[in-house]
Image: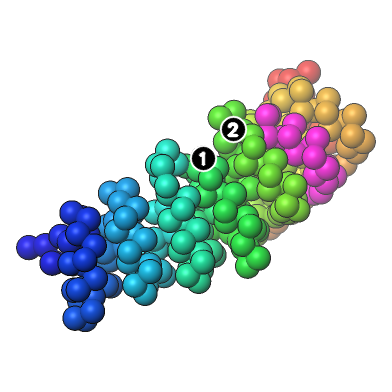
Amino acid sequence: GELPLHLALKTKQEDIARTLVSHKANVNAADANGQTLLHRAIQRDDHFSAHFLVKNNASVDTPDSVGDVPLHLCADKANSDGMSRIARNLLDSEADPNFQDSNGNSALHRSVMSLNKEVFDILLEQPKIAIDLRNKKHSTSFAIALTKLAENESFARELVRRDCSIDSINPETSDSLLHACARVGNETAGLFLTGNGAKINLTNSRGESPLHIAAANGLSGLVSALLEKGANCNLQTSPLSFAESMSSPEAEQVFNQTPLHLAIVGGHE
């Protein structure tokens, strides 16, 4: 059954809720999924209950069984009136703006994923916000914003304005964001990065520059933009590591390639 405090809050009976709290009702009571009364209030867009609980010292950083804290849930709800007020209330009550969920996503990551501009803006006001925090896939909030440019480019623009790292390197692939955008064919993001001062001659562990990858993938607009910005068209790819060459019969032929070589190999003359 429902807890008396939960019922009193759901039905907006504030006097009863206050009486229950004064008699030591547990403001942090959790259900079988680890969701506290505060999680559940946010899930049902119940601003009244959320504000009451925060005001009565409910924990603002208790994760549920999937690792979500209340601020994550606020970030997910893009079109909910008043969700930004709850987010601000949580942060004013010392909620950790950098708390990471089970996938390593912070509320900032999740506000970008859900295109929740109101909560995104509030998070960026926080002095302690870690703007370049990476999730378990090594993605920053800016990397996610680059995948959302077609829907809304204001997230990426604001992060650049706030001096996010636009050249962050993925430690697993050694690709920069510009490499990564070219690799998946996201020319829009590649052009955005190039136009916002990304380093165009960074090379990954294989000696590939963004120009190599853009040329190999036939991204003519990005190739032109990179060349206009002074990309070095004579950079050559490096020999593959021994492990890679053992698994690749073509290994001996794939280094010392310029972007022009790769464009021709890819059929993009």
Residue 52 point in image, percent of width and height: 33, 64
Q: Residue at 27% across / 72% down in the picture?
A: 27
Alpha carbon distance from label 1 to label 2: 8 Å
Residue drawn at point x = 51 percent, y = 40 percent:
115
- Specify whether 11 is left or right of 50: left
Residue 230 vs 138, above or below: the answer is above
Q: In the shown orientation, is residue 120 left or right of residue 225? A: left
Residue that numbered label 1 is attached to: 115
Q: Is residue 263 visible?
A: no
Quadrant of res 66: bottom left
Point 17% across, 67% down: residue: 16
Displayed quadrant of residue 179:
top right
- Regarding residue 129, the answer to whether it shows in the image is yes
Q: Name the residue under label 2.
A: 152
Q: Is 183 one of the magenta-colored residues?
A: no
- Numbered tag placed on residue 193 in the rendering: none
Segment tinted magenta in the rendering: 187-203
Image location of residue 5, percent across then percent down: 18, 67
First in sequence, mark 1 or 2: give its number: 1
Q: Tell whether label 2 touches label 1 (CB within 8 Å).
A: yes
Q: Position of residue 86 (x, y in %)?
A: 43, 56
Q: How crowded is mark 2: few (under 14 residues within 10 Å), some or many (20 or more)?
A: some
Tag 1 secondary structure: loop
Residue ranking furthest to the left? 1
How many residues crowd mark 1 within 10 Å: few (<14), some (14–19), many (20+)?
many
Q: Position of residue 160 (x, y in %)?
A: 73, 46
Identity, as a three-letter code, of the amino acid under mark 1: Leu
Residue drawn at the location 76% of the way across and 23% of the way down: 221
Nearest the viewer among 166 and 248 is 166
